[in-house]
Image: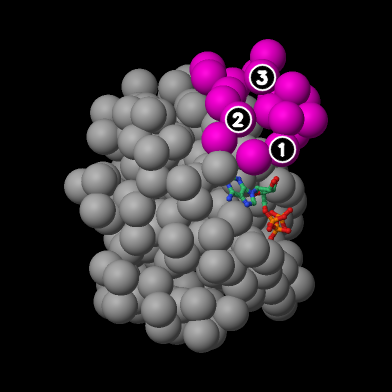
Amino acid sequence: MGQFAVIGLGRFGSASALELIKMGHSVLGVDTDGKVIDKYADQLTHAVIADVTDRAALEELGLDNYDVVLVAIGEAIQASLLCIVHLKSLGIQTIWVKATSHAQHLILSKLGVDRIVHPEEEMGIRVAQALSYPMVNDYISMGNGEFVVEIDVSERLEGVPLNQVLQGVPDSIHVLLVKRKTQTFVHPSDDFALEAKDTLVLLGQLNALKAIAPKLA
Ligand code: ATP
């Protein structure tokens, strides 16, 4: 179980905090707005009213015990930046920040935060990819152009063995597993026969994955 602190419980911060709770982590939520804290107090591990532009208030939160501090203050850029400066001066190890502009991104990267998140842009890219490849349920970038993707198998491939489906596909693509209802088949053999509604989890270079996705749909 991880320990996370989320500063700013707007739409982005509260969604991140609640998802972390769902995943079984411990989450401290912080906001200046008492109404916001009241709203989430029952759902988070701890919820505290504090103005994070105040270094002393931030120090009192004991954030050095947390794995990651996520600063999710968007519009109030000055407050977000001041909070980061204080977190850095308090020696907080891992800081993730929501950014809303390129200017803010530039300053944050100079301040040495660990990850800068651009939710609107990142979501826009995911939506465009989902529109373009509707058969791809989900994906994770592994770096170096490699991705793990989850693809639903078309009903027309019922009974077809994997080696036939993957004929002509570059060797660089690996079938990591097949999901079938509640079962999971890890590294399925070449003659593994697919069933309708199976889901394939593949690892490979993006271009090769793009070429194979339509074959499975
Ligand atoms: P979203 O789009 O995620 O809803 P936003 O980009 O509109 O958020 P803001 O409304 O600026 O972001 O801030 C998100 C939350 O951060 C708000 O609930 C706000 O009360 C809180 N917040 C703003 N300034 C501070 C501060 N100095 N200390 C603590 N919390 C703050």
- Pointer 3 local density, CA inside 10 Å: few below 14, some 14–19, many at least 20: some
Q: Nearer the viewer, residue 20 or 41?
A: 41
> Residue at 52% of width from left, 17% of height from top?
45
Does label 3 or label 2 sit earlier along the sequence? 3
Does label 2 or label 1 sit earlier along the sequence? 1
Percent x, y for residue 146?
Answer: 34, 71
What residue span does the magenta drawing correspond to? 32-50
Query: Looking at mark 1, is its residue's CB closer than 8 Å to ligand 1?
Result: yes
- Pointer 2 local density, CA inside 10 Å: few below 14, some 14–19, many at least 20: some
The answer, for residue 53, to whether it is visible in the render is: yes
> Residue at 44% of width from left, 22% of height from top?
26
Does label 1 or label 3 sit earlier along the sequence? 1
Q: Is residue 118 left or right of residue 129?
A: left
> Residue at 39% of width from left, 72% of height from top?
108
- Pointer 1 local density, CA inside 10 Å: few below 14, some 14–19, many at least 20: some
**Does residue 177 sit above or below 116 in this rendering?**
above
Q: Quadrant of residue 92?
A: top left
Q: Is residue 21 left or right of residue 63?
A: right
